[in-house]
Image (cartoon, rainbow, N blue to C red):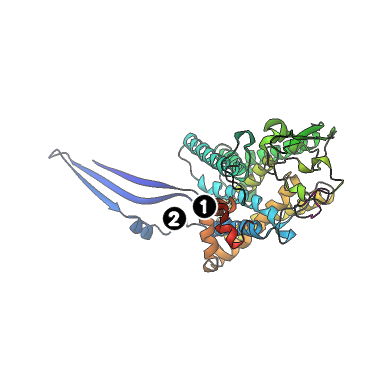
Amino acid sequence: MESYVAIKNIDEDVEMGNKKNEICESRSVMNNAEKTTTTTTTCYSSKQQRQTQTQTQTHRLVSLDVFRGLTVGLMILVDEAGGLLPALNHSPWNGLTLADLVMPFFLFIVGVSLALAYKKLSSRVVASRKAILRALKLLALGLFLQGGYFHRLGDLTFGVDLKQLRWMGILQRIAIAYLFTALCEIWLKADNTVNSGSSLVRKYRYQWAVALFLSGLYICLLYGLYVPDWEYQIPTEPSSAPITFSVKCGVRGDTGPACNAVGMVDRKILGIQHVYKRPTYARMPECSINSPDYGPLPPDAPTWCQAAFDPEGLLSSVMAIVTCLVGLHFGHIIVHFKDHRVRMLYWMIPTSCSVVFGLTLDLFGMHMNKVLYSFSYTCVTAGAAGFLFVGTYLMVDVCGYSRLTTVFQWMGKHALMIYILVACNVFPVLIQGFYWGKPQNNILKLIGVGS
């Protein structure tokens, strides 16, 4: 009697599913006459396995890393040069700039990666547990980095007042979108075979239903919630009482800075003391004499100009999930279709429709707004991400010009590390901690950074 067992050690690959590192084959042969058993074991190293299974393994899509690296590069450019050119700075309110593309691009590529990571699942429960754990880690990291513990350059105070801790932020939003999209990919897909565009839609119809439901829910809440009058306080000298400002609203469907439902939800649930203290609308002409930059208030400035407002709030994060689901659809096309022309065709059709639809909505009054994460903004930015991804895929994975993008590949593979060190000011703040005589005499001031 002969039994054959193959034992595989599997390491998890975040973007391209599972990779096989080593195979050991055990073959047992029993001799019934002599009552003896002979067992032979043969092991193949990772290098030998790669040589023998070149045709069966799925190679890593370089365009994923390049796309992520381009987004990281754009983020650094915006942070360092955003104050020099308005096109490289976030729009104060309505409108779209290059800076406003960074967040949707990150969410889009998270969705693409999730489709590849969960291509084959051994256990949905285990996969869900791991997704929840990863999201909690990212959420905790976001609270530590963006909750207020790491201060702006030039702010030499230490620590964070828990009464003023910022609950939401970029990493927190990505964590929420990642978790929701991962659970959709794990649980909400049918078992039918995909061999056409229509069968692809049928297989993932429940995910599309979730995306439509979230979009409809956001629109209903944004235009249907009643926003009452509200007030906030601005601290003055430690020995003086804070100044109280009242904002008159009492409306529904307002999408201006003062009386929108997005801000109201954050004030009611998170508390105004726990939202972002430096909103972009403070650079509007109504609030700054140096608009589109920050500056002193005009004499007739509205009362809401100094109020806190979180660009990564709760209600606006609903549409961030939709952007992640759009990226998930792009990843599904990679999984189920192998021909380059078919992939790009199925990508370009929804991408073009999304951009045209979003621009049409903006033309008819539903303006693109990054802070509110409006529906038109979602459509246009998801389409822009699709165009960039298709162009990157064509250049790198189809035409093979990968050497030209080596730097962006490296940045894409280390995106989180670069974000933490650069965008969250961790590296500059660490350098700022070394000074001569007094904290103001630090290296950053010497070279003119943060002054």
Q: Residue furthest left?
A: 34
Q: Which residue is mark 2?
A: 57
Mark 2 belongs to which amino acid? Gln
- Residue 144's quadrant in the figure? top right
Q: Position of residue 405 (x, y in %)?
A: 55, 65
Few, some or many residues within 10 Å of mark 1 (<14, 14–19, 20+)? few
Whether residue 343 sits left or right of residue 289 in the image: it is left
Magenta residues, dominant SS class: loop
- Residue 391's quadrant in the figure? bottom right
Q: Nearer the viewer, residue 149 or 103?
A: 149
Query: From which residue to which does the magenta span run?
Result: 285-297
- What residue is at 63 percent from the left and 43 percent from the top? 169
- What residue is at 38 percent from the left and 58 percent from the top? 50
Q: Which residue is mark 1?
A: 417
Residue 239: in magenta span: no
Whether residue 436 sits left or right of residue 314 in the image: it is left
Residue 225's mark?
none
Q: Position of residue 412 (x, y in %)?
A: 54, 57
Mark 1 belongs to which amino acid? Met
Q: CA distance from mark 1 to mark 2?
A: 29 Å
Q: Nearer the viewer, residue 437 or 413?
A: 437
Residue 287: in magenta span: yes
Q: Nearer the viewer, residue 415 or 18?
A: 415
Q: Going from the N terminus, do you reach mark 1 or mark 2 first? A: 2
Whether residue 367 sits left or right of residue 441 in the image: it is right
Quadrant that contains the N terminus: top left
Whether residue 445 sits left or right of residue 235 in the image: it is left
